[in-house]
Image (tube, helix red, strand yellow):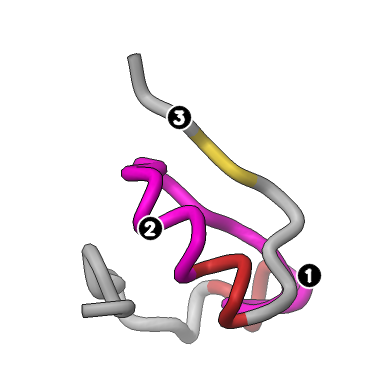
Amino acid sequence: MIVVAEGIKTREQQEDLARRHCDILQGYLFARPMPLAELKKLPDFLPVNPAK
């Protein structure tokens, strides 16, 4: 099973969920909602585990 955590706003939340082996994190800590045009400007890759 893959676990996704939403609403991550702080590094403390990120670190706690990483220790608990959460697979995917998303929230304002990483990016705010944005228009599609802005999203397309981002790189085609993101770090798999930026906490390490």
Instruction: Identify which residue, 35 or 6, lies in the foreground.
Output: 6
Drawn side of residue 43 relative to residue 36, left or right: left
| Residue 7, disc | none
Q: Describe the element under mark 3 as helix, strand or loop.
A: loop
Q: Amino acid at mark 3?
A: Val
Q: Amino acid at mark 1?
A: Pro
Q: Who is closer to the viewer here, 3 or 35?
A: 3
Q: Magenta span covers which residues?
A: 15-35
Spatial CA distance of label 3 from label 1 is: 21 Å
Q: Position of residue 22 (x, y in %)?
A: 40, 43
> Looking at the image, is mark 3 or mark 2 earlier in the sequence?
3
Asked if the stretch drawn in magenta spans residue 34, the answer is yes
- Cα–Cα gap, marks 2 and 1: 23 Å
Quick check: 35 left or right of 48?
A: right
Percent coordinates x, y for residue 16 in the rendering: 50, 61
Which amino acid does the dot numbered 2 rest on?
A: Ala
Of the pair 47 and 2, the residue shown nearer to us = 2
Residue position marked by numbered label 3 in the rendering:
3
Residue beneath label 2, please? 18
Q: Quadrant of residue 48?
A: bottom left
